[in-house]
Amino acid sequence: MSALDELLGHARETVALGEAAGLLGWDQETMMPRGAADQRAEMLAALEGAVHARRADPRVGALLAELSDAALDPVSAAQLRIVRREHHRATRVPASLAAEIARVTSLSQGHWAEARRNEDVAAFLPWLAQVVALKREEAAALAETGGALYDALLDGFEPGARAAEVEVIFAQMRPRLVALRDRAMAAPAPAEPLAGHFAEEAQRCLAMRLAGAFGYDWTRGRLDLAVHPFSSGGGDDVRITTRVDPRDPFNCLYSTLHETGHAVYEQSIASSLRLTPAGRGASMAIHESQARLFENQLGRSRAFTSWLFSAMAEAFGDFRIGDPETFYRSVNRLEPGFIRTEADEVQYNLHVMLRFDLERAMIAGALEVADIEAAWNERFAADFGRAVPVPSKGLLQDVHWSVGLFGYFPTYALGNVYAGQLFAALREGVPDLDTHLRAGDPGPAVAWLRERLHRHGSLHEPGLLMGKVLGQDMPVAPDPEPLLAYLETKFSDIYGFAG
Ligand code: ZN
């Protein structure tokens, strides 16, 4: 067997084990009986330990060294780039630390969920302190000499990204988002919010109809309920979850569209890449760009909501909004809310910036876990002008920190930025987009994304992939300008002031 075949065969089994761990994670969030938490934590830690050991295997290092000068076809070269990267990261983190992180975060997640239900921050903080300590230890192991701890974690989700660059992008975005938000909030509301009772079963049916319309393949996926909607898995088994609130069907419908964006991306990766290192999305920000495009640029567009208006009437009967234009304005109205996942397009990135600054300070050791709730509440009041009423609307709203996802939040905002760049190109590439969307058919837009972006998986690094999609054969950096222009145009129109 050639060195290349041996290495790729080994990598394939590692990917398969990772998929098995992912499936157990999905089960933990959807089906698992609560009493199984400790047992599940041990199972996940064992699998994580096995995956880690395989990635760090000295034989992998030897094969990589043997192949370093080999002339490879582009696909094999891309696979090796990913294997090399994972090997490099795994050899820096001791296996015992990797397994301990898997065990503690699995338990911590359950304690977060309980603390959130009981509005009990004090019960969660000891777990958060453990997770932060472990992630700092991991970051120190990963960081290049003198490198920032936070960058080492960010790099795990967004290869090559640096906090200092994110900071520059956020500084460009913040003043324009705040100005747009303040202007809109001072204007008369463009429409009333949705009110009434919306049957849960009808919500789920409509959510499934939306997912199908956006290209989700039900023969290779399923929809279940979870506290925090997510998408998981790859290749031929990509599952999504949503949540249902009888007073707010938009929560269910737009969460579903968001997760469908993630899932259709995974389902559309070339089948030749299935169960290989390059067989997943290119990065978290690229992933998020697809989810946000589906949810916002397409799903909350005037054209698509005019179709959704009729579909809502079919699903729920008369729901007190009389025409598609009022419905569009209601879908897009700015709300003075506390919850990131429910935030409108204008304020969403401000929620991310708050988390980015706080988690960066925690990982740097500049903010103690004991002070995190006070820091959160103070910052929220400064950014949003309101006091956080209960922890579930503040510090305890997101699952991320409980499961050790430090460095993940900025990828949401970078995803929005990429979505802005991609949507500008998509509009040019599909000139009759609105005609299709008005008929409830995002198919041509999804086909455009599949052909140019989805099918490549991780064959290209995020910047180069963006460059290729945007028609340039070189890396393209995240540029917030198209997103800001899109938001200013859309919301000055809805709120009736000059952009
Ligand atoms: Zn997402």
Image (cartoon, rainbow, N blue to C red):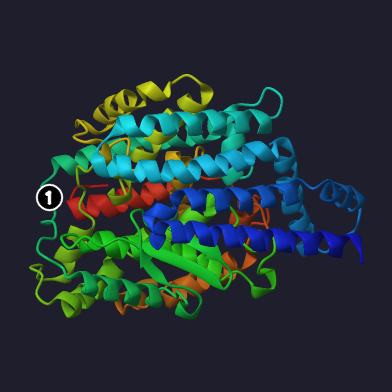
Residue position for label 1: 189
Residue 227 position, x and y percent, is: 33, 54
Q: Residue at x 51, y 76 (%)?
A: 220
Place of residue 242 in the rendered image (x, y in percent of width and height, measured from the top left): 34, 62
Residue lying at 38% horizontally and 54% vertically, measured from the top left: 34
Q: Can the viewer see residue 349 in this picture? A: no
Horizontally, is 159 left or right of 79 in the view? left
Number of numbered callouts drawn: 1
Q: Position of residue 170 (x, y in %)?
A: 44, 35
Q: Is residue 254 in view from this perspective?
A: yes
Q: Residue at x 37, y 49 (%)?
A: 485
Lateral position of residue 109 relative to residue 207, left or right? right
Towards the viewer: 138 or 357: 138
Position of residue 322 relative to residue 353, above or below, is: below
**Relative image position of residue 188 (x, y in whole percent):** 10, 47
Q: Is residue 436 above or below residue 164?
A: below
Q: Nearer the viewer, residue 430 or 369?
A: 369
- What kind of residue is marked 1? Ala
Binning the other alpha carbons within 10 Å of mark 1 as few (below 14), some (14 to 19) or many (20 upward) gives some
Image height check: is 186 above or below 428? above
To which quarter of the image does residue 431 belong?
bottom left
- Towards the viewer: 184 or 227: 227
Apparent side of residue 303 relative to residue 22 in the rendered image (left or right): left
Q: Is residue 468 left or right of residue 263?
A: right
Residue 395 position by quadrant = top left
Q: Quadrant of the N terminus?
A: bottom right
